Image (cartoon, grey):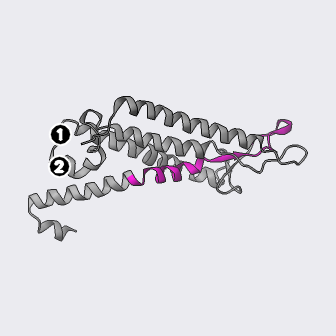
């Protein structure tokens, strides 16, 4: 890598650097929802309806692996507790970090959107929008990840049973309805906003 950069002129090196930045930002943009979803799965825990009765503690178990109990902070040997700090870092790095990264970059180049350096690095992110709405891509990212995380974090176990051992789907149906209403609300707000703002560049 050092040998390659040493053979480049300053202009070629700048173009090479902008190309690497473009690849980095493109990967972050394309992988944003995927990375955010995987980071949030650590907190996708399901309540055990059999617990919490007769004054006992309510137990939650990881949706992806029901053998792992969640929110057991007083047990350092618990797998979920051991990985909790890393999960928090992942949340800060992906759902929050990538969004803040794009917002920061767009804020810094807001007066230089037409410069070649800006277009060659993150132009793909704002070129399709009108100049006054160059930041609209941030809202689209926020919309997409909100819908996905709503479905993930408000999930429920469909195999719950009532006290008589009969399968009870009412809780799962309620959660599904809640997920649908939340997703529809987000989409409706964005559609109304987009209709009035007309952010896309039709040229």
Asked whether residue 72 is in view, the answer is no
Q: Quadrant of the N terminus?
A: bottom left
**Magenta stretch: residue 34 in it?**
yes
Q: x and y percent of residue 44 in the render?
A: 62, 47
Label 1–label 2 contact, CB within 8 A: yes
At 45% from the left edge and 34% from the top edge, which residue is drawn? 190
The x, y position of residue 159, in whole percent, is: 77, 51
Residue 46 percent coordinates (x, y)? 69, 46
| Residue 174 seen | yes
Number of callouts: 2
Q: Quadrant of residue 173?
A: top right
Alpha carbon of mark 1 to alpha carbon of mark 2: how far? 9 Å
Which residue bears the numbered disc 2? 117
Q: Is residue 182 above or below residue 120?
A: above
Q: Dot 1, crowdedness within 10 Å: few (<14), some or many (≥20)?
A: few
Categorize mark 2 by other alpha carbons within 10 Å: few (<14), some (14-19), many (20+). some
Give whichever of discs 1 and 2 has the lower sequence position: 1
Residue 165 drawn at (x, y percent): 88, 48
Element type where label 1 sits in the image = loop
- 130 lies above or below 93: above
Image quarter where the C terminus lies is: top left
Residue nearest the observer in this picture, 156 or 132? 132
Furthest-bottom residue in this view: 3
Q: Give the residue furthest to the top.
A: 196
Q: Secondary structure at mark 2?
A: helix
Question: Residue shown at 51%/46% (left/top)?
Answer: 88
Region in magenta: 30-58
Residue drawn at point x = 41 percent, y = 43 percent? 141
123 to the left or right of 87: left
Label 1, on which residue? Answer: 112
């Amino acid at each position: 890598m050092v040998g390659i950069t040493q053979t480049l002129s300053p202009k070629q090196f700048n173009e090479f650097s902008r190309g690497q930045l473009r690849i980095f930002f493109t990967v972050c943009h394309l992988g944003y929802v995927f990375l955010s979803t995987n980071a949030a799965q650590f907190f996708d825990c399901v309540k055990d309806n059999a617990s919490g009765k007769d004054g006992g503690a309510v137990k939650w178990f990881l949706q992806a692996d029901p053998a792992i109990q969640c929110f057991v902070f007083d047990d350092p040997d618990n797998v979920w507790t051991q990985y909790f700090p890393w999960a928090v870092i992942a949340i800060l790095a992906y759902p929050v970090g990538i969004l803040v990264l794009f917002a920061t970059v767009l804020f810094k180049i807001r007066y230089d959107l037409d410069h070649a350096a800006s277009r060659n690095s993150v132009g793909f992110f704002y070129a399709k929008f009108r100049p006054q709405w160059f930041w609209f891509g941030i809202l689209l990212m926020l919309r997409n990840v909100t819908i996905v995380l709503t479905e993930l974090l408000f999930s429920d176990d469909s195999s719950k049973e009532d006290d008589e051992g009969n399968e009870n789907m009412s809780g799962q149906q309620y959660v599904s309805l809640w997920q649908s209403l939340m997703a529809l609300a987000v989409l409706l707000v964005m559609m109304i906003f987009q209709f009035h703002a007309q952010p896309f560049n039709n040229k």
